[in-house]
Amino acid sequence: MTMMATMNFMLTNRAPPLLLRQSPSSILLRHLTSTHHHYPPSNTPETKPRVIILGSGWAGYTLASRLSKSHYDVRVISPANHFLFTPLLPSTAVGTLEFRAIQEPVRTIRGLGQYYMAKGREIDLERKVVMCEDLYKGVKFEVGFDYLILAAGMKSNTFNTHNIQRLEGVVVFFLKHLYHARQIRNRILECFERASNPTIPKVQRDRLLSFIVVGGGPTSCEFMSELHEFINQDVASWYPDLIPHIKLTLVEAGPGILGSFDQALSEYYLRELEKKNIDVRLNTAVAGVDERYIENEQITVARFKDGSEVNFGTMVWSAGLAPVKFIANSNLKLQRDRVTIDDYLRVPGTKGRVYALGDCAVNPADNLPPTATVAEQQAIYLTECFNKYYSDFDVLDEKNSDTEVPLPGPVVPALMPFNAISFLNKLLCESSPKFQFKNRGAMASMGFGGGVTDLKSTDLPSPKTTLSGYASFIVWRSTYLSKQLSLQNTLLIPMFWFRALVFGRDISRF
Ligand SMILES: Cc1cc2nc3c(=O)[nH]c(=O)nc-3n(C[C@H](O)[C@H](O)[C@H](O)COP(=O)(O)OP(=O)(O)OC[C@H]3O[C@@H](n4cnc5c(N)ncnc54)[C@H](O)[C@@H]3O)c2cc1C
């Protein structure tokens, strides 16, 4: 790649302490392959252990904001310079909420040592450096660490389905990052504008007004509900002639939707989708996407494994997770594409210097699912370990270079979803040095006034029950509103909800 600069330089405020213990040959090699750029230039003496966090999602951002900055020099490396509040992402794809109201910039974390907009590429455990690649010019650089936290999440899995990757961003869209939601919103509006054009051939209009959502998990179901509501409330007002031509299809390879929810709730959600005239196809896997010509018009067609086909203009693909390249290429032990960790979130064999959490990690003993509640609770646990226990270990002392960081003492699990009442955790839970996951229940929204909440196996001190309809809608909105990390978003979000309800969603495309 021509964009890939070969320049290789060390990012040091101070030499990474463990580099001092390298062999002379590795030091020579590093100097031969590097320029002598030092960024940022500084003569700051080494005083605090450096914690490098790869990723700024639920795990990385939570940890970076909570780690004690008086004990640690905390630095974040991530291609995203913001934290994304993922549960609200489907709403932004149709304009119920605006994009900027569901993110928090990384740089505003109080006391953060540095943030680098880059991707981690390789880890050198021997030298305790992580090789990174800048996002814009592909410039490679190395950052030394005393502790490394892997929180790089996962990416959408295409399962090598024919043409999905090639047509991504054109007619096929993932729903994982903010820019995905922006792409989807623009594409939906483009489809409606093109379909309203008086010269549009029928075959093309029908294709543009056909939307397929792939996957039966909460993200797909929530996006489909949002799309339906947008069509019902806004498209019906501004493009009334198009309504009879719109086709919504949800495809799931398994026998049901919302598989992780109580069965009665999954069935209820399915019935609600069907009542809205959404064509839900269960036990139907996508075999591929083809581009064909019909009546001289180029058409995109989804082929299903049962032999059926649907022409479409927009496909939202949320069918599974795959490891990011950095994790897949690492020499770390993986289990089902996730880094294997122990009960203390440590990567085995790294003497307590490398930790992994969130979607990119799994402890084979508990096999927790890749969800925000797991990532957040792991980050809170690890913060406690670092702030309370690991700060007593002098990782900078060369005498300790081969010493395992002692295991932590008891940590109270983060059962309560809200910080303001976290004091209750001590009363409700037993503490343990090991990470303990607490089930806070599960929710899936269904647009205004709808949704499902599963509290059947929750550890919260609440009735073990399920909710649907308005009750679930109120729980969903109030929970996510009260979980916002800034006052700004806590104010903006209800304002956008109000705007969508009273004035409708914005349909401008730019
Ligand atoms: C639309 C949507 C809705 C969801 N709704 C819910 C919900 O309601 N409840 C729930 O519990 N879960 C939900 N989830 C799942 C939840 O968002 C994830 O489980 C959670 O984000 C995992 O946190 P994480 O920090 O491990 O990964 P992420 O939040 O994905 O963050 C990973 C971070 O790593 C960065 N990164 C990627 N590659 C590299 C690299 N090479 N080097 C450095 N950084 C890198 C990314 O840019 C990102 O900042 C939802 C997910 C989506 C997509």
Image (cartoon, rainbow, N blue to C red):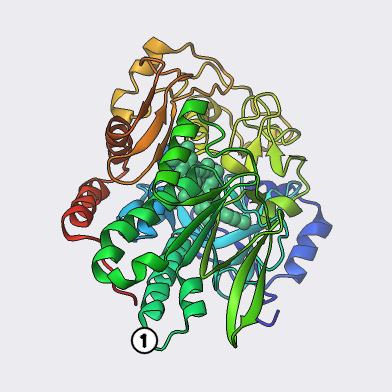
> Residue 447 at x, y = what percent?
33, 46
Neighbourhood count class around disc 1 (C-alpha, 10 Å): few under 14, some 14–19, many 20 upward:
few
> Residue 211 at x, y = what percent?
49, 63
The quadrant holding residue 8 is bottom right
Residue 56 visible in the shown view: no
Identify which residue, 233 or 353, lies in the foreground. Answer: 233
* Residue located at (64% from left, 47% from top): 17
Give the left or right position of residue 174, taking residue 488 as reference.
right
Three-letter amino acid code at the position of disc 1? Pro
Q: Is mark 1 within 8 Å of ligand 1?
A: no
Q: Secondary structure at mark 1?
A: loop
> Residue 114 at x, y = what percent?
46, 55
Identify which residue, 256 or 95, lies in the foreground. Answer: 256
Residue under label 1: 198
The quadrant holding residue 420 is top left
Residue 319 vs 136, above or below: the answer is above
Q: Residue furthest left?
A: 502
Q: Residue furthest right?
A: 25
Residue 127 vs 302, above or below: the answer is above
